[in-house]
Image: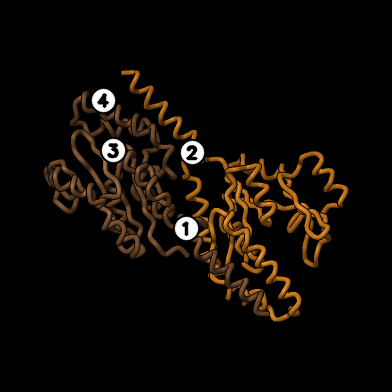
Chain colours: A brown, B orange
């Protein structure tokens, strides 16, 4: 069966718990998955380390990466570039690992266009009410921040249907299991096993002609 | 998430162990799955019971079922009709059960045409050699029978790529798990959760306009 890794994009509502989900999935299956780290021109926030949350690069360096085709996708948000370095992704896929990109919808659709076999997963709370609770629930944000998050959530929701699967984040445990199950199942798709089917057919024809 | 049942077609090489797989899956998850029983005009074989392996009906009765649109698909093999009664399938789907049809490729493609959401699964041994072992391995068949089975296997192989997923029958245990995982994952497809996505979007818009 399919031995090559699958390229997986995970997006989802801000506050849907994607980050925690990714961390847990990788901790549990370190030999199965690899998490791609994005390059960005924005400044590191407190607690962020270069090469862990992001590769922090200058605008100049980023534009050189674009020019040399070293990114499989990139996008600009609020004057900052974000992109996915190609090398890491391709080498991990060749090793047979499923490579996960945690990126926004625009990047997701760009990746899908270039790599049509990409699996698009969208993480969502079980309901809009639950989503709202999470957006306001931290208790430290101003009304303005909450409203801007709500606006963003509406935009994010608009893209949901472009994703292949929805992962409902009711609990971390179930969320990790759903994601792992979906990816395992995807490895069994006929369209990802053309080589296996070709071999079975050729072997059968060979046996038939031999008799 | 998606509560309605999924219509599932299982096909596969003769000798791939479909029958045993279905029995085990249903024994293990009786509340999740329902197995559709085909109607046929062929005579019962030793050990077959009406309403268990098949509904055995006369040619006349079968043609009446066709005329009244009581079958969701039917086909004729070697002078005998085989078909899937509609009532059972639709009532079980409405109950939220995943309904499994064990039918041949021609029927599978007909069902898919009428119900595009049908999930097509193909059961295959891990290799053509293994398949051949199973075809000849019973030790009781003449060379002629074996050759006709090999011919049939070649025909069956030709249709594999129309199926959504391959289930590799290396062991019964793994086979049941693969099939159950694939179906569970399919329930999370965005295309099977249009209602859920619509509700989230509407709720978000409503919250936004309320403030």
Disc 2 crowd rating (10 Å Cα; few below 14, some 14-19, many 20+) is some
Q: Disc 3 designates what residue?
A: A15
Q: Chain of mark 4?
A: A
Measure the C-alpha gap from mark 3 to mark 4: 14 Å
Q: Could you tell me residue B59's position as x and y percent?
A: 86, 51
Chain letter for the residue marked with disc 3 in the picture:
A
Which of pointers 1 and 2 indicates the residue nearer the eye? 1
Task: Name the side, left or right, on which A18 lies relative to B55.
Answer: left
At 86% from the left and 52% from the top, the residue drawn is B58
Question: CA separation, marks 2 and 4?
Answer: 27 Å
Q: Say what secondary structure mark 2 lies in.
A: loop
Look at mark 2 in the image and give the residue it sits on: B193
Q: CA distance from mark 1 to mark 3?
A: 32 Å
Q: CA distance from mark 4 to mark 1?
A: 42 Å
Query: Between disc 1 and disc 3, whose residue precedes?
Result: 3
Distance in Å between CA atoms under marks 3 and 2? 21 Å
Q: Which mark is residue A192?
A: 1
Q: Residue furthest right?
A: B60
> Where does the image place residue B44, in percent across and percent down from the top left?
81, 62
What residue lies at 49% left-to-right and 64% top-to-bottom?
Answer: A195
Q: Is B192 left, or right, of A204 in this rendering?
A: left
User: Which residue has dot 4 on it?
Assistant: A147
Q: Residues within 10 Å of mark 3 (few under 14, many from 20)?
A: some
Q: Residue at x 36, y 63 (%)?
A: A96
- In the image, residue A20 sits, relative to residue B170, either above or below, namely above
> Residue at the location (79% across, 56% down)?
B50
Query: A71 above or below A210?
Result: above
Q: Is residue B56 above or below residue A122?
A: below
Q: Can I make out residue B114 in this image?
A: yes
């Amino acid at each position: 069966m399919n031995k090559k890794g699958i390229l997986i994009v995970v997006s989802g509502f801000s506050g849907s718990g994607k980050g925690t989900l990714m961390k847990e999935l990788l901790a549990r299956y370190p030999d199965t998955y690899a998490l791609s780290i994005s390059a960005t021109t924005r400044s590191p926030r407190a607690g962020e380390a270069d090469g862990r949350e992001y590769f922090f690069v200058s605008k100049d360096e980023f534009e050189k990466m674009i020019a040399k085709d070293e990114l499989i996708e990139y996008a600009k948000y609020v004057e900052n570039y974000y992109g996915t370095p190609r090398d890491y992704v391709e080498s991990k896929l060749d090793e047979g690992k499923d490579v996960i990109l945690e990126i926004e919808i625009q990047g997701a659709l760009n990746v899908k266009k270039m790599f049509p076999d990409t699996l698009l997963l969208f993480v969502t709370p079980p309901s809009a009410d639950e989503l709202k609770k999470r957006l306001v629930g931290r208790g430290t944000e101003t009304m303005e921040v909450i409203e801007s998050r709500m606006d963003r959530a509406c935009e994010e929701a608009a893209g949901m249907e472009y994703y292949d699967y929805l992962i409902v984040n009711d609990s971390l445990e179930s969320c990790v299991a759903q994601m792992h199950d979906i990816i395992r199942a995807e490895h069994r798709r006929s369209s990802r096993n053309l080589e296996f089917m070709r071999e079975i057919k050729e072997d059968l024809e060979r046996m038939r002609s031999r008799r």
